[in-house]
């Protein structure tokens, strides 16, 4: 066992490391379902706090914002989600469970979100309402989750099947 380990170590000792040089030589790797920075539609958010309740990383808390009377009539308390991107795991549960489709996710990740100042990772509702400055695509929405639920890939087993 020791010889096998030493042989593998010697094999990779003189090879160059496999590291993607983002963004110098390659753009960040993104797919059609890359989960990144959130966008909040203040006109749809009712302040129900469901996004906060389902967040496994406790990255979301609710913040009261001062707005003129009658601006967001659907949100009587005027509380909206504030997301700490430093804590966020980008799981998408907040988007999936939002009953009013107020949250969505973009493909803005990695290098675009990099910062040396940790205090800038806390995104207030007004900041989340403004789309990212860089080129982006909305990749995760409530409608996407509903489509998955309405058209499941796995068909349920028929009645009377054996349960081995």
Image (cartoon, rainbow, N blue to C red):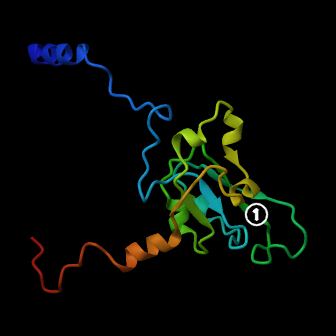
Image quadrant where residue 2 sits: top left
Q: Would you say 163 lies left or right of 80 here?
A: left
Q: Is residue 86 visible?
A: no
Name the residue carrying label 1.
Answer: 79
Residue 130: x and y in percent read: 71, 58
Q: Is residue 68 above or below residue 34?
A: below
Residue 52: x and y in percent read: 61, 58
Image quadrant where residue 146 sits: bottom left
Q: Would you say 121 lies left or right of 97 here?
A: right
Q: Quadrant of the N terminus?
A: top left
Element at label 1: strand
Q: Residue at x 69, y 45 (%)?
A: 122
Q: Residue at x 60, y 49 (%)?
A: 59
Between 137 and 145, the one nearer to me in the picture: 137
Q: Would you say 12 lies left or right of 45 here?
A: left
Q: Quadrant of the C terminus?
A: bottom left
Residue 106: x and y in percent read: 55, 57
Q: Is residue 72 above or below residue 28?
A: below
């Amino acid at each position: 066992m020791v010889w096998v380990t030493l042989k593998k170590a010697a094999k990779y000792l003189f090879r160059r490391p496999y590291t993607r040089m983002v963004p110098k030589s390659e753009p960040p790797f993104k797919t059609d379902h890359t989960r990144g920075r959130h966008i909040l539609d203040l006109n749809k958010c009712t302040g129900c706090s469901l996004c906060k309740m389902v967040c496994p990383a406790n990255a979301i808390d609710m913040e009261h914002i001062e707005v003129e009377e009658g601006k967001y009539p659907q949100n009587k308390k005027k509380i909206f989600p504030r997301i700490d991107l430093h804590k966020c795991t980008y799981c998408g549960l907040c988007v999936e469970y939002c009953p009013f489709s107020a949250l969505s996710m973009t493909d803005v990740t990695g290098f675009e979100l990099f910062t040396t100042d940790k205090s800038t990772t806390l995104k207030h509702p007004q900041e989340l309402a403004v789309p990212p400055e860089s080129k982006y695509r909305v990749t995760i929405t409530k409608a996407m989750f509903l489509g998955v639920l309405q058209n499941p890939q796995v068909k349920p087993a028929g009645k009377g099947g054996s349960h081995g």
